Image (cartoon, helix red, strand yellow):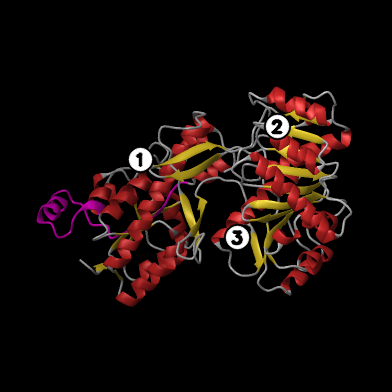
Amino acid sequence: MDQVKIARALLSVSDKTGLAELGRALAAHGVELVSTGGTAKALRDEGLEVRDISDLTGFPEMMDGRVKTLHPKVHGGLLGVRDDPAHVSAMEEHGIGPIDLVVVNLYPFAQTVARGAGRDEVIENIDIGGPSMVRSAAKNHAFVAIVTDPSDYPELIEALGTSGGMTSLDFRKHLAAKAFSATAAYDAMISQWFAFSDQGQMFPDMLALTAHRREELRYGENPHQKAALYVPAGPHARGIAQAEQVQGKELSYNNYNDADAALELVAEFRDAGPACVIVKHANPCGVATGGTLLQAYQEALACDPVSAFGGIVAVNRPLTALDAEAITAIFTEVVIAPDADEEARAAFARKKNLRLLLTGALPDPNRGGLALKSIAGGYLVQSRDNGRIGEGDLKVVTKRAPTEQELADCLFAWTVAKHVKSNAIVYAKGGATAGIGAGQMNRLESARIAAWKARDAADKAGWAEPRTIGSAVASDAFFPFADGLLAAVEAGATAVIQPGGSIRDDEVIAAADEAGLAMVFTGMRHFRH
């Protein structure tokens, strides 16, 4: 059956947005309105005639409203197949009238959890009757329209107006698909709360994850791939997906990926002084702190000005006009900051394609959570890498202990190395990266590449020597042989920070002592693939 005339509608909503307009539109088409509790009151307050659900069922609402719609006269009216003689006969025999439209949105479970409600209140906000009606109506979409989202009210009102109070099968199919997505997401959020919050599980037997599509992207990592951005349906941290895009072209898949890498790294410095991160292909190519954001940007750019072209810039402080003028002096794809003043926005506006993203507060680098990776035939799930190292966690393993400045450079380099693709080597000096080696199949090559980049940067800047001279070097995993460490010695490093744990640690420590290096072990690895 294509066109179905709406004669009776059942409305029961927790979100009253748009309810009055919908109620008036239905009444104008002569639809009988059946409703529950607060929804019925809201409709009556608008001067609309409403039939109580208890009048329809012949049974009172009870148990604080827990039992009101779970009744054959409701679900029979929803599930009855109108062109099946046996169904029609049963409905007539038991006095069950058809219900042609259901308008339901569910108890605000996620919002209740998000505001930190106690367990009893959370449980009370698990909707039972609502999802039951939604599923019944959606299953019988051949005859029943189900609306779960207030944003669909205008489309429903328009459909009724153009068809004389009827709905089409295509429209009902569309609504049914949304309805089943809504109940699936709702149940998944409840499942997550029980598993993670109530039971304290990290890896439950069934991992139910749901997300809303925020937007379809132009293409994926490559033009022949398709892509979209989704955001979690339940409570979640704020990040790039929630940032305000002030200007510029729409973000691509690669923009989002690189911007996320930049934001996660700059967030490590959210409680520090001014800091700047420049990222290219999800790897930092320059990171620095400074007395001002402008100084931090200039120092980060100096690390690898070639790679910075067309890169992503992220900072941990609001941007000023001086910052914006410096950043826009070279081609930059995306700029990320907590905020930007009007003069900075005006400067960026002169580069109409540049994307300016304002995040507000930066995400907490210590937050928990799960990281998920798709593999052929399954998913790999692990806890988020929120490991951090402080001065008190370090173990000096060489004869010489690091100086105060070397120690500061070690910790800075270690923070950056955590966000570099393995094998990762980072040289740092004076709160700025001197050279970064990323993604090589062996640690020796990463050390050599980082040193070569530092020499190239010195040549371009006209410095007398590369910044690796007198630097600290961080390795995301242990040195399996002394060769990677000796490459750092050749580059001019004087201090080393690494996890330790190799069967050849003694050999590496001996090489460090012979070269006069100070070396500390963290006892923590930061592989990143």
In contact (CB < 8 Å): disc 3 and disc 1: no
Sequence-wise, the earlier of marks 2 and 3 is 3
Tell me the mark number nearer the camera, choosing from 2 and 3. Answer: 2
Which segment is the magenta one? Answer: 78-107
Crowdedness near tag 1: few (<14), some (14–19) or many (≥20) residues, C-alpha within 10 Å: some
**Label 1 belongs to which residue?**
67
Q: Is residue 438 visible?
A: yes
Residue 121 location, x and y as percent?
51, 36
Crowdedness near tag 3: few (<14), some (14–19) or many (≥20) residues, C-alpha within 10 Å: many
Question: Is 455 left or right of 209, judged from the image as shown?
Answer: right
Q: Nearer the viewer, residue 417 or 149?
A: 417
In contact (CB < 8 Å): disc 1 and disc 2: no
Count all numbered tags in the image, as a single digit.
Answer: 3
Is residue 132 shown in magenta? no
Residue 221 location, x and y as percent?
52, 59
Kind of residue indicated by mark 3? Asn
Residue 503 location, x and y as percent?
63, 23
**Label 3 belongs to which residue?**
255
Question: Is 272 left or right of 200, judged from the image as shown?
Answer: right
Look at the numbered disc 1 and give the secondary structure of its residue: loop
Choose top left, top right, bottom left or bottom right for residue 410: top right
Look at the numbered disc 2 and give the secondary structure of its residue: helix
Instruction: Name which residue lies at 44% across and 44% down.
Output: 375
Crowdedness near tag 2: few (<14), some (14–19) or many (≥20) residues, C-alpha within 10 Å: some
Question: Is 171 left or right of 240, judged from the image as shown?
Answer: left
**Label 2 belongs to which residue?**
482
Instruction: Name which residue lies at 48% across and 54% down.
Output: 212
